[in-house]
Image (cartoon, grey):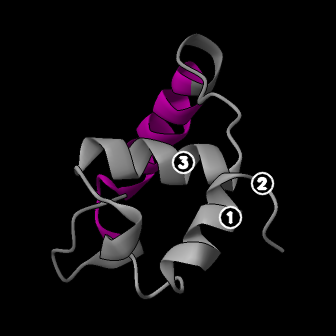
Amino acid sequence: MARRSGHGQSHPLYELLDTLGVLIEAYEQINHPLPTSSGVDVLHYLMEEHALRQADLPEIGSQGVVSEILNGSGS
């Protein structure tokens, strides 16, 4: 969390920034929790956001493999 300035934990503001980070994280978890999503949901979302097709994902596998994953039948 703290910006690297060469002082690390010995920096005078380290404890303040550490505490502030903890408080912000707690606030976000209470007031802006992340929705629970499956990996398939996230993949669908990312494909839509980036205008990707199954053929654009060769790292995952062939179009057939990607199709199986998106349909929930992949392992």
Q: Which residue matches tag 3?
A: 42
Q: Which residue matches tag 2?
A: 72
Nearer mark to the viewer, of 3 and 2: 2
Q: In this view, does 49 lie above or below 6?
A: above
Residue drawn at (53%, 29%) of the image: 23
Task: Classify residue 41 by image quadrant.
Answer: top right
- Determine the CA span between mark 1 and mark 2: 5 Å
Q: Which residue matches tag 1?
A: 69
Which corner quadrant holds the N terminus?
A: bottom left
- Determine the CA span between mark 3 and mark 2: 13 Å
Task: Classify residue 59 by image quadrant.
Answer: bottom left
Main secondary structure type of the part rendered in magenta:
helix
Of labels 3 and 2, earlier in sequence is 3
Of labels 3 and 1, earlier in sequence is 3
Residue drawn at (52%, 24%) of the image: 28
Q: Is residue 30 above or below residue 42?
A: above
Residue 42 in picture, x, y percent from top left: 54, 48
Amino acid type shown at disc 3: Val
- Determine the CA span between mark 3 and mark 1: 12 Å
Asked if marks 1 and 2 touch (Cβ < 8 Å), the reply is yes
Apparent side of residue 13 relative to residue 45 in the rendered image (left or right) = left
Q: Which mark is residue 29?
A: none
Nearer mark to the viewer, of 3 and 1: 1
Q: Does dot 3 land on a helix, a strand or a loop?
A: helix
Amino acid type shown at disc 2: Gly
Residue interval drawn in magenta: 10-28
